[in-house]
């Protein structure tokens, strides 16, 4: 029933390749099927000014999409002179999600910037960015631990995300673009390795959903995130 | 236990005054306690260009906050030269929420712009904007029905929103600023008059939450939205 | 002869409600007929950098108009990415006018920002902003005097403003929008409580005026400002 | 008593050189002492869109100042990414002033853009821009009359401007920078060749002025504008 | 002598992988050693408006660099709100270079946009962008020929580019970042498959160079471009 | 054969008038035929922050064109809200060129800003800006030497520039607009007084050129720059 022939609870093939750029402190290329996101983590010695003297660190994220990552070319945001609303919304979400898994005191007064750049898009780019962004963050933090810049691990748990939705009346996991553009309701579920919730965003444009449907999507998300966390573990082992 | 002395499930006093500006096709000043939002609805004869020839209409929203709506003055966004990320995120949410209650075919190829300007802020401005924005929209649509521009009602149901969160370990409804700034988890719940869900956004920065907590907040939200819908009915009767 | 039925020298009904927002150090909602402006004054501990070490303070103003304050919706300046020329011109005028009534040495090295936001427009918004802005400033300065932050009163006199013009060949006071859009010549007159002039701006687009007409408008302005000052006194008593 | 040794009513030496650029339809370099402004008029075949079908034309102005026109270098507005408030205010004034002398029906549905670029500044640049801008406009309009594009003269009268102010307690004409920066009150007076008023802007920052002082400045302005109009006539004869 | 141990005339290893994104009409990932650029070509049905009715097509380019493509993170241009001067200069160069190899009449009234996004930078990104951009363009044009949209080949010859410079007093080919940052003189040489010159940019900051040195660099460039053209041929065979 | 009737190697009449503005530390108006550029040099006490503590100075340039410097009016960049790509490219070139002739250690930690504003354009504005910009720089540096702020001359040699191109199949020097808009290949050649090369930019849009043609243009450039340097000497003697 799904355009890709997947079962309702099937995720797309997951691939997380680490160390893909020679400059970044942490990096990976995450592929969820045809959605490919390059994630890099940059360690900066200074925390943002609002944290000066607090002893706390910060993790933030920026998101971008190459102009031809999509089926029709999007105008380059740098040329347009500003980041669109969708971009701003997504990068704020990625930053919040990753921070939820960070012990900012253990991180110390420094900032890690996670850049998520979509090389190719086929739905679910924000979730892939979070899952891959966590891997880049993990690798960068490993360097801080190795050099002794951090003495206890600032990462409290894995953070991963999946989109699930109601497609053709059925709850399905890991929507691709063909499903996403048709789904009446879809949601992004961000969870920890222990299965706790960090953020839930469910939305129905021109429709509504019930608590029962919501629960079915949460069930799918829990199972899906477990697979993503396993992939993160394999990639960063 | 709550700073305001309210019970866990108590909403702040609700006031919705309609017809507050002489120019707009629909308008109201909604007050949720000390949060005051002026909502106006403007009918435009043309739909956005991407709808040309589709027979469908559009509802969009813009959100702003007067510089001194808050305890310390915020820089005026017009002077800063752009809308901040928070503003962009909120106005996209308001627009999506309101559209979920609209039969865009019955609306016809026109656009209604709902402006939500926060006069005074004490937490929950996005939810108040949605609840008040729907009232402004209702009043504007009434004019379209009266003049025969629309022959069937484009508004399928009420749309209202409430924020609920975990404050001091307890689930509470309609967070004010004092609670919001302390809450480990908070959520915005947008629902219809019939109690169906339109959008759920739950978020925990530097923390996590369980499905059980989520369900408790949903219970509070259902009860709260019912009161808001009653207030909308009274205001637009 | 006037669309509103007023006599040539009649002002619109004046209403100045103070303390309208709980956050600002000083605030009022001024209504000149259907022109409604919310004025707030914010005290900032630091003067602008060009005054560092001078012992002098500063008063500045910002002006905005809600998108649907007018008969047809104006594009939101924050969304447009800049303040329009008219806005810039008006807020510079308000700032200059208010500063003319301030003993900047008595104010000390601090800044007061007066925000004037037009909730509903029917002509004369810049004049109402000055008259109402002075009330907000007065209330904020009262706090500085009460706490002893200022030991002598930085406000030397009232500052109020009125627009007068030649409408249908006759000099009329306090133009409303219907008159303003037809007037061949119109002027803004800013004066002190003692009747001294602070700023005069008279302008004729596609026409000219004589010194005799100018003097007639000044006579109307003197009488009008006296009434505005009386209203300021009543509001801040 | 004046820094330049001029009498109270003396203008600086006036020089208006026409035809200074080979491309513009009309141009002049106006010098009021050390204030030098290059004015060009460009005829555009189309009026702004708000005049489409009205049969009326438009005259607009833009103003700029070379970065080192002043004693200390100003940041280039193109590099800063926007025109400052002062620039916007001035160019709106120039445009309004010139339009006041134009029969827009005789001009027909076309636009003339008058660019005023300050090469060297020593006070009074906006007034010099108006006086010189009119000359550029006159020369451009002459071309329209010569080719028959206009059959009756769209210019109803001369338009010229002068600044006068209270310097060291005395009313003086044509303020230079040394006077302007010290003057308690100063005004810009825009008049026609027939001596009618187009715009009066008098302003006192941190001070006030009386109607008697205002009248003395108007007297000076009338005499000064007459000299400027004579210079315009000589330049365009 | 070279940091990489290469001979003076040695290029870095060249790799051109085509078909790297599923959406673009043409694409490749070009690697010149550690410099990696993703190039995509997008066919747009319409030429820019200045070509309307001319029968001629257009090729343009945009250039970007991922924030962490370099050793220290660069601010994202979309977040900064504009493309930097270096970016603008480079993308104009790429566009001019590619157009030099295009028969715009054979292309017809359509536009091809070549996006060059630097994934990893180690010197020579603009040259790699031109060499790789041509491959993406070639593949996109092949589609136009296959569908019959173009009946004769709009690509007249290969276009490829190399940077050469004076490093440690010696002329060297294909500078990497370590060399580029030390070179007294460096140049970018853009040539056709037939060895004709399209663009030469040689520059010495804080130094000068002789015609003899210039000729030595041109010799290196000719040999280097021949190798790049061979790689283009292999990739697009 | 040339539209102007000049011989192939003839430059246009050169005029360099110095001291043209009373404020700048150095200034000139350079005329190459109908191309007129006003160049001013401003000495700033501080070097850019990236040079702090280095003991080195900086020379930078900004370029602008008055809106009606050209045959049809260009939009004012300050009004457009940004400098166009061409402007950015040109001002970077001017800055690099001038710096190549500067001993930044002898200059000391200060900055000289060279503003080049095109009053009238007829081709070759970037080259005239460099040649005239050097004169303004020379005059400003003379002041530093006179006051003892610099004890040895920071200017190592003259810097001048000329454009040459292939017009109607022939190599010609100092292209005017009529030639420039027709030339298949054109180049800008920046050289020192001693005849060394600083920058060479040759470009062929929609065409190519040979090394032989390149050499012919270099020969013309060498002879032309010698004449420009002679004019610089005469102007600054």
Image (tube, coloured by chain):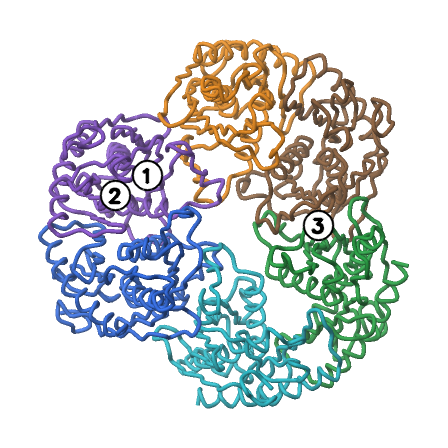
Chain colours: A brown, B orange, C purple, D blue, E green, F cyan
Q: Which mark is residue E45?
A: 3
Check the image and report above or below for A47 versus C32: below
Q: Nearer the viewer, residue F199 or A209?
A: A209
Do the residues bearing badges 3 and 2 touch, measured as CB atoms within 8 Å? no
**What residue is rendered at 33% in x and 31% in y?**
C38
Query: Residue E66 at x, y = what percent?
Result: 70, 51
The part of the image, by quadrant, that contains residue F124 is bottom right
The part of the image, by quadrant, that contains residue C36 is top left
The part of the image, by quadrant, that contains residue C44 is top left
Check the image and report above or below for B36 versus A45: above
Query: Residue C168 at x, y = what percent?
Result: 19, 40
Dot 3: element? loop
In this rendering, would F128 be left or right of C203?
Answer: right
In this rendering, would A151 be left or right of F27?
Answer: right
Q: Which mark is residue C98?
A: 2
Location of mark 1 (residue): C114
Query: Residue B191 at x, y = what percent?
Result: 59, 16
Check the image and report above or below for C90 versus E90: above
Label 3: chain letter = E
Q: Residues within 10 Å of mark 1 (few under 14, many from 20)?
A: many
Q: CA distance from mark 2 to mark 1?
A: 9 Å
């Amino acid at each position: 029933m799904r355009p890709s022939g997947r079962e309702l609870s099937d995720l797309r093939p997951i691939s997380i390749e680490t160390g893909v750029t020679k400059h970044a402190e942490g990096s990976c290329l995450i592929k969820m099927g045809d959605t490919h996101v390059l994630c890099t983590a940059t360690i900066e010695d200074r925390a943002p000014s609002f944290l000066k003297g607090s002893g706390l660190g910060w993790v933030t994220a920026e998101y971008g999409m190459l102009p031809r990552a999509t089926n029709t070319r999007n105008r380059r945001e740098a040329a347009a002179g500003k980041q669109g609303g969708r971009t701003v919304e997504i990068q704020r979400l990625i930053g919040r999600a990753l921070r939820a898994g960070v012990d900012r005191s253990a991180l110390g007064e420094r900032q890690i910037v996670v850049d998520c750049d979509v090389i190719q898009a086929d739905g679910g780019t924000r979730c892939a960015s979070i899952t891959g962004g966590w891997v880049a963050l993990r690798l960068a933090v490993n360097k801080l631990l190795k050099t002794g810049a951090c003495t206890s691990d600032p990462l409290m748990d894995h953070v991963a995300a999946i989109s699930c939705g109601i497609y053709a009346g059925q709850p399905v996991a890991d929507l691709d673009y063909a499903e996403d553009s048709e789904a009446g309701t879809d949601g992004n579920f961000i969870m920890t390795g222990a299965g706790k919730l960090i953020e839930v965003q469910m939305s129905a444009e021109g429709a509504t959903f019930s608590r029962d449907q919501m629960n079915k999507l949460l069930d799918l998300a829990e199972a899906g995130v477990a697979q993503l966390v396993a992939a993160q573990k394999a990639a960063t082992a």
